Amino acid sequence: MKLHEYQSKAIFANYNIPIPSGKVASNAEEARQIAAQIGKKVVIKSQVLVGGRGKAGGIKVAATPNEAEQLADQILAMTIKGLPVRKVLVDEAINIAKEIYLGVVVDRAAKCATVMASAAGGVEIEQVARDTPEKIVRVQVDPAFGLQEFQARDLAFAVGIDKALVRDFVTIATGLYRAFVANDASLAEINPLVVTAEGKLIAADGKIVLDDNALFRHNDLEQLRDIDEESPAEARARKAGLSYVKLDGNIGCMVNGAGLAMATMDVIKFYGGEPANFLDIGGGAKADKVKAALEIILSDPNVKAVLFNIFGGITRGDEVARGIVDGLREVKTKVPMVVRIVGTNAEEGRKILADALMITAATLEEGAQKAVAAAQKQ
């Protein structure tokens, strides 16, 4: 789950990370009032969960409150990369002398968090990694001890922080790591962390991505979710308790278990197909959940065939079969269905599906081949 800039920076402020004075506005009049309160030149920043806002015209500088109102009105009427702008952040403008990147990310290879810094701030870190990887400095953090001050100082010196600002940089870096851990984030970054012309450090922009699996511990953060970012299918899947990610292929996948779902997608690709989604119905799924999953898959017009790969442990094969049949009674479709069920009550499940004249398969390989062939015929 991604947080908006204004939400991320509000969290940063709780961890001794300096941010510009500013507030979020939902309309142009509010933007004018905030600019008047600040009493200086301001930046009007669209709040959408995509990169490239500036290039799209979603970030503008206003010298007066009236100009802030005009620019906010323009930006609030925009759609950036398919997402409507519903709010703008009105921030005090900063006299920028230098821009730095600072971020914390889960490093799965190292099995710990890694703090990254770069003197090439203000640019997407992916571009820096691609074009000039030598400009990114990394330190791995022992989860038992957290980010140590000496590690933060090493980062400061590596990116050319002035000696007088090293202590402030250490405070910001350790604060960012604490925010990352306390909020169960998978990413927390400041880009850019600005050195101002007045010789101060300030987080001019911020981004936090939360681990969805930990949101049960953070009801307050769950309330910050932006439904505009989600596709209707993903929003529906979340409400149904399903793990769903839309992909670009044409073979829908319904599987119980994340590992089995990944293996299913791999086998589909091995036999020349392209998965249309990742969908894990989870253990113990009942007929109603299977029905909801099927409706979500078939809502994608790109789907030309559906492969069900169910391993019956906690999940019963007959329950899954009933869910599929019930779903097809309500969702009329000519999309071919290929089903592979093994394990608990698999025989009962296969009988239900055979009576419904569906394509069955004994193995995953057979199921993938049949699904790919069926999709190619559509």
Image: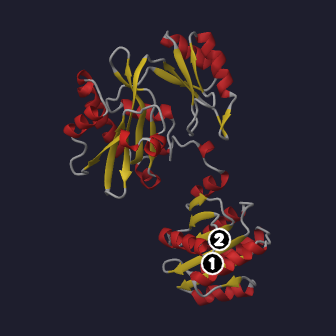
Residue 51 position, x and y percent, is 55, 38
Which residue is at the front of the view, 286 or 61?
61
Residue 17 position, x and y percent, is 34, 29
Whether 207 is drawn above or below 69: the answer is below
All told, the count of numbered labels is 2
Quick one: label 2, few (<14), some, or many (20+) residues within 10 Å? many
Disc on the earlier residue, 2 or 1: 2
Q: Which residue is mark 2?
A: 273
Q: Which residue is mark 1?
A: 368
Q: Is 129 on the left or on the right of 162, as rendered? A: right
Quick one: label 1, few (<14), some, or many (20+) residues within 10 Å? many
Residue at point 24%, 45% (across, down): 146
| Residue 13: quarter of image | top left
Amino acid type at circle 2 is Gly
Do we see residue 54 in this rendering? yes
For label 1, the SS is: helix
Amino acid type at circle 1 is Ala
Of circles 2 and 1, the one toward us is: 2
Residue 341 position, x and y percent, is 59, 83
Residue at point 35%, 58% (across, down): 109
Residue 119 position, x and y percent, is 37, 32
Whether 244 is drawn above or below 207: the answer is below
Q: If the image is split into quadrants, where does the C terminus sit?
A: bottom right
For label 2, the SS is: loop
Q: Are marks 2 and 1 in contact (CB under 8 Å)?
A: yes
| Residue 377: quarter of image | bottom right
Between the C-alphas of marks 2 and 1, the distance is 8 Å
| Residue 103: quarter of image | top left
Do we see residue 179 in this rendering? no
Residue at point 61%, 28% (across, down): 58
